[in-house]
Image: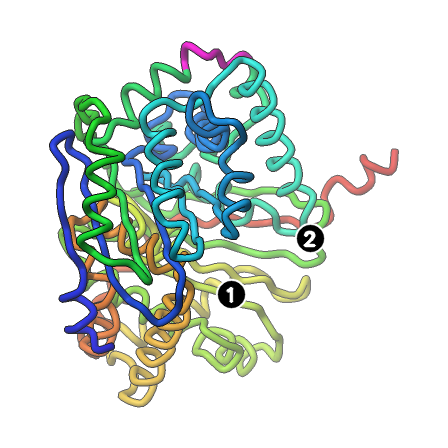
Amino acid sequence: MSAVAAEAAIVRHTLGNGLRVVVAEERSAPVAGVAVHYGVGFRSEARSGFAHLFEHLMFQGGAGAPDDHFHQVESAGGFCNASTRQDYTDFYDVVPAEALEHVLALEAARMREPKITQRAVRTQASVVKEEILGKLRRPYGGFPWPKLSPVLFRTFANAHDGYGDHAALDGVTVAECAEFFDRCYSPSNAVLTVAGDVDVRRTLDAVERLFGSIPARPAPAAVSYGEPEPDGVVEGECADPLAPLPAIAVGHRVPDPAASPRAHIALSVLAAILASNAASRLPERIRRDHGQAVTVTARAGLFDLLDARDPDMWILTAVHPHELDRRRVLDALDAELGAIAAAGPAPGELLRARLRQRTSHHRSLDHLANRVRMLGRFELLYADPGLTTRLPELFDETTVEEVAQAALGLRADSRAVLTLVPGAGKEDEAR
């Protein structure tokens, strides 16, 4: 299906209670995807990890449900999951097409009234705490997120650990959860997306029948989380007793994605030029200048491209040998950014980077779960679900000048640098 045809197949509708609905018919396989995005993420919370905890609580299902959401979806032959990001929480299900209305009813039930008890709060707080510990039990767990955010940012909303911490999750009450649900999980603060082997008219009729009677509540007032960029380099350090090699993470503030999506696309292409594989600019320069191999990754966005409102960051990480000083890695990065800012990428280099971005995007959309989530996220954040199908065109349109400008904006005198120290704490553990 062409991008034009695909975008034409996207239907947008708004119910009387304010729920935005996106339906995308694409009948390549007999499956349907459903995603519900709520306009509340970890930047909206007062307790570290509360939004993440509430994501878990929603899987208890709707009030009066005989079983939790996981079991009800799996019994229909599907799977489901969720995630909590800076500005949204999304829940998604993929099921056989004939089970679509069943899953819509499950999502409507928990949007109307989730089943939240004090026992469930205690249980899910323990699950989240175990997830936190599991992350820390892996080498480079929590690197660069969430440890880079408090280096680059200063306000609680932007800098705290949205994954959660043990102390902050102690003592959460049902009343707190009810208030959070009432304030943040209203239909007017949500987007329902349905994609796959679906009939648009029948789907909209089912959505109206199942979701239309959910009482309307005001959406939370829009909040700006903007803060000044760092005045000079800001640095932090973390220890990882399980990491075999040292590493650094570099974070830069990026332009408001809603105001300048093309700038974000250029930053993503720049990331591919610098760090997409061992032959990319940065690892190749370090190998040539110092005879050392480094593992480098880079991306535009804390989690993904165009995945948040302002502010967001561009991230580069490098895992390097002990004998290679981190300063040399930073110098090599600055040299490559300076060269690209001055002359731009070579035409062939730009073409390869754009093709890698296109290929990665299309590969991601091969999975219905990714496709339905991206449609909903772009509707929620930018009121533009069609951006899902136009991204490849935007990659192709990225110019040498735009990439050069993106490199120029990543200034060495206005960034965060997080240094990971490996092996620290092993002796203490032994004792």
Asked if 251 appears above or below 293 in the picture, the reply is above
Image point (33%, 55%), residue name: 372
Nearest to the observer: residue 418 or residue 54: 54
Measuring from the top left, give residue 341's x and y in whole percent: 26, 72
Which span of residues is magenta-colored?
171-176
Which residue position is annotated with label 1? 329
* Residue neighbourhood size for the residue with mark 2, other residues' Cα within 10 Å, grouped as few (<14), some (14–19), many (≥20): some
Which residue position is annotated with label 2? 243
Quadrant for the C terminus in the image: top right
Query: Is residue 137 inside the magenta stretch?
Result: no
Image point (25%, 77%), residue name: 1
Does the rendering let one see residue 312?
A: yes
Measuring from the top left, give residue 204's x and y in whole percent: 19, 47
Image point (54%, 46%), residue name: 74
Question: Residue 353's image quarter?
Answer: bottom left
The colour scheme used here is rainbow
Which amino acid type is marked by label 1? Val
The residue furthest right is 431
